[in-house]
Image (cartoon, helix red, strand yellow):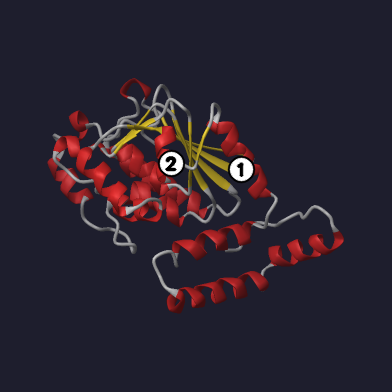
Amino acid sequence: MSNIDYAVHDDVAHVRLNRPDKHNGLTLDMIEDLARAADRAAEDRSLRAVVLSGEGPSFCSGLDFASVGPQRGRIMRALLPKRSSAANTFQACAWAWRTVPVPVIAVVHGHCYGAGLQIALGADFRFAAPDADLSILEAKWGLIPDMSLSASIAQLTGIDVAKRLTMTGEVFGADQGLAWGLVSSVGDDPMAAATELIDAIKTRSPDAVAASKALFENTWYNGSRLSFPVEQALQVRLLRGKNSAIARKAGIARTVPEFVEREL
């Protein structure tokens, strides 16, 4: 992959933006490879989590306009929807992480601007260092965010905050992001915090974790009439599965469960 590192350690996929000299500014190749990395993670039933991070001084400074700008034909092709979710390539590099059946954690430090923020918001959790600064920077270029932010930010904060940040492009710190609901946690070692959460999640059935993610991804915007059938269908699948039986047996015996590979 071009400037996107993908490695698996202890059943956790580490997806790392690796263009540190440009603060991980995104090229079109990187955008395409991020979407492919999400697809790869989604297909790996042995995974228990994914960590998104950036090499060097920043998580991601956004789109590298100097690299992307001259490639007009390729930009237009990337804007065409290509997936069942109606996402195009730009949107998929951020939103496709929502389709991965394991928790995805973005570990953010330094600049997290524009496309970088949209990728972080596509994760399930965002653990940030105190030095992180964030911005919907598209306003600077006379644009709106178009890499899935309209869907992701609606789940996290109020419409007034979303409008303000999109209209102004103002830069804000990690603590303010936490107050607005855009950041999950702020700490001196966000990678350690991410690992601690992953270790806790690993003690639970991988199928129940996958179903938990699917439950909210498929019901968050819906009322009870549409949400209840999703709950019912997911629960029936879990009750028929091996890992649910393993969890119940271990719970009754008060032993540590040894789960098998995810079925969902």
Up/down of 173 relative to 95, above or below: above
User: Is residue 141 toward the left or the right of residue 165 in the image?
Assistant: left
Location of the C terminus (image quadrant): bottom right
Q: Position of residue 178 (x, y in %)?
A: 45, 40
Cα separation between marks 2 and 1: 20 Å
Q: Residue at x 27, y 42 (%)?
A: 165
Q: Position of residue 144 (x, y in %)?
A: 20, 46
Circle 1 sits on which residue?
A: 197
Q: Earlier in the sequence, mark 2 or mark 1?
A: 2
Residue 179 got which mark? 2
Mark 2 vs mark 1: in front: 2
Q: Position of residue 239 (x, y in %)?
A: 67, 72
Q: Position of residue 214 (x, y in %)?
A: 50, 62
Amino acid type, label 1: Leu
Residue 136 occupies quadrant? top left
Up/down of 225 relative to 216, above or below: below
Q: Secondary structure at mark 1?
A: helix
Q: Is residue 77 visible?
A: yes
Q: Are marks 2 and 1 in contact (CB under 8 Å)?
A: no
